[in-house]
Amino acid sequence: MTTSQNHFEMRFGVAFARFENNFMNTIAHSQREVEAAHSLLSQATVLFDESHALSYALVMALAHTPRKEFSQQEIDGLCQLAYELLNKLTKTNAIFRETRQKLIDAKLSAQ
């Protein structure tokens, strides 16, 4: 083997090692992004399920009770329920937006 072949093989080995290292770092970064998105979507799913249950309870209470039969305390309770529903939906929306942005950022960094 000549000196130039040894030099070429050494440079090729170093370049390949850099490529392999960068590739593995990209995979690890992508895996972290996927795990973060999965976690956020799991949180959003719980909030969505709770919001669905609250909205169902609110609708059923309003639909099956004559308006004259609501006491001030019941109206206050229904208002509180509606407020909780609004808060859960607001949090869910924020999580979906954050997750969407993380996925967009991950896609752009992978390109």
Image (cartoon, rainbow, N blue to C red):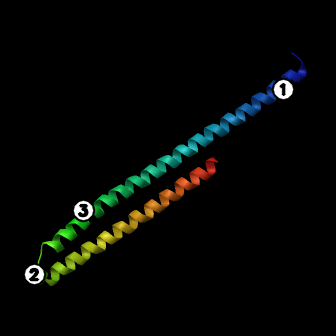
> Identity of the amino acid at label 1?
Phe
Counting from the top left corner in percent of width and height, residue 59 is at 21, 70
| Lower sequence index among marks 2 and 1 | 1
Q: Do the residues bearing badges 2 and 3 touch, measured as CB atoms within 8 Å?
A: no
> Identity of the amino acid at label 2?
Glu
- The answer to whether 69 appears left or right of 43 in the picture is left
Which residue does the image show at 72% across and 31% down from the upper left? 16
- Per the image, label 3 sits on a secondary structure element best described as helix
- Using a 10 Å C-alpha cutoff, classify the residue at mark 2 as few (fewer than 14 neighbours), some (14 to 19) or many (20 or more): few
Residue position marked by numbered label 2 in the rendering: 69
- Per the image, label 2 sits on a secondary structure element best described as helix
Placement of 11 over or under 90, stated as above or below:
above
User: What mark, if any, has residue 53 been given in the picture?
Assistant: 3
Residue position marked by numbered label 1 in the rendering: 8
- The answer to whether 26 appears left or right of 2 in the picture is left
Counting from the top left corner in percent of width and height, residue 54 is at 25, 66
- The answer to whether 88 appears left or right of 26 in the picture is left
| Lower sequence index among marks 1 and 3 | 1
Counting from the top left corner in percent of width and height, residue 3 is at 89, 21
- Using a 10 Å C-alpha cutoff, classify the residue at mark 3 as few (fewer than 14 neighbours), some (14 to 19) or many (20 or more): few
Q: CA distance from mark 2 to mark 1?
A: 89 Å
